[in-house]
Image (cartoon, rainbow, N blue to C red):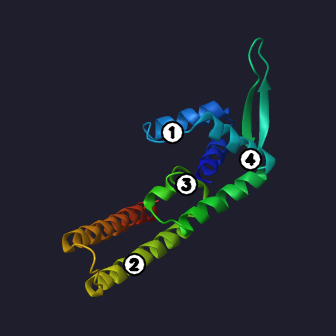
Amino acid sequence: MSLQIFILGMLHKGDYHPYDVKKRIVQGTNNTVNVTDGNLYYNFEALLKKELIQKSQIIHAENRPDKITYSITAKGKEVFKEEIYKSFKNAKSIRSLFAALPFIEYVDIKKLVFYVEEIIERLNKKLKELEERVLAAEFESVDPNFKLLMSEVITESIQLEIRMFNKLLVLLQNQ
């Protein structure tokens, strides 16, 4: 749904042709997100079938396929907001929010703050449980050096997520 969130967000700002949306994704992510034409057009069609977007303009040109621009519907705006909330509520990592973050102006920031606080609490609990389990666990078949490495990778990745969600929390609170 993250590509669909981005499409709906772009159409919330104005009418766009799918290629223009793709350009904005690629430019906005410094070419780190690759969107294939097939995936892009598939998602536009899916949103069209759900009546979340509509064709707004069809430009006919000789010797070229029609150029169709799309707009978001009222139903699309509601679903878009709910999908942003759902993204925040169910976020497993900061990266999972990348499609929603550019469009938080369309939702209630206080709700997002609440969700991010819950995420931070959940991650802190997970980190504490992990540290307690690692201290108590004995993996006889695993070399202690590899066990330590695995433990550090997991612990540090959770700590990084906590730091990034704390930064996001501050940004949201300052909106």
Cα–Cα span, label 3 and label 1:
17 Å
Tell me residue 169's x, y (percent): 42, 66
Cα–Cα span, label 3 and label 2:
24 Å
Q: Is residue 117 left or right of residue 19?
A: left
User: Which SS class for mark 2?
Assistant: helix
Residue picked out by circle 2: 126
Amino acid on which disc 4 is placed = Ala
Task: Choose the circle earlier in sequence order: 3 or 1.
Answer: 1
Mark 2 surroundings: few (<14), some (14-19) or many (≥20) residues within 10 A = some
Cα–Cα span, label 4 and label 2:
36 Å
Mark 3 surroundings: few (<14), some (14-19) or many (≥20) residues within 10 A = many
Mark 4 surroundings: few (<14), some (14-19) or many (≥20) residues within 10 A = some
Amino acid on which disc 3 is placed = Ala
Cα–Cα span, label 1 and label 4:
19 Å
Tell me residue 107's x, y (percent): 60, 60
Cα–Cα span, label 4 and label 3:
19 Å
**CB within 8 Å, label 1 to label 4:** no
> Which of the pair 22/42 is nearer the observer?
42
Residue picked out by circle 1: 34
Residue picked out by circle 4: 46
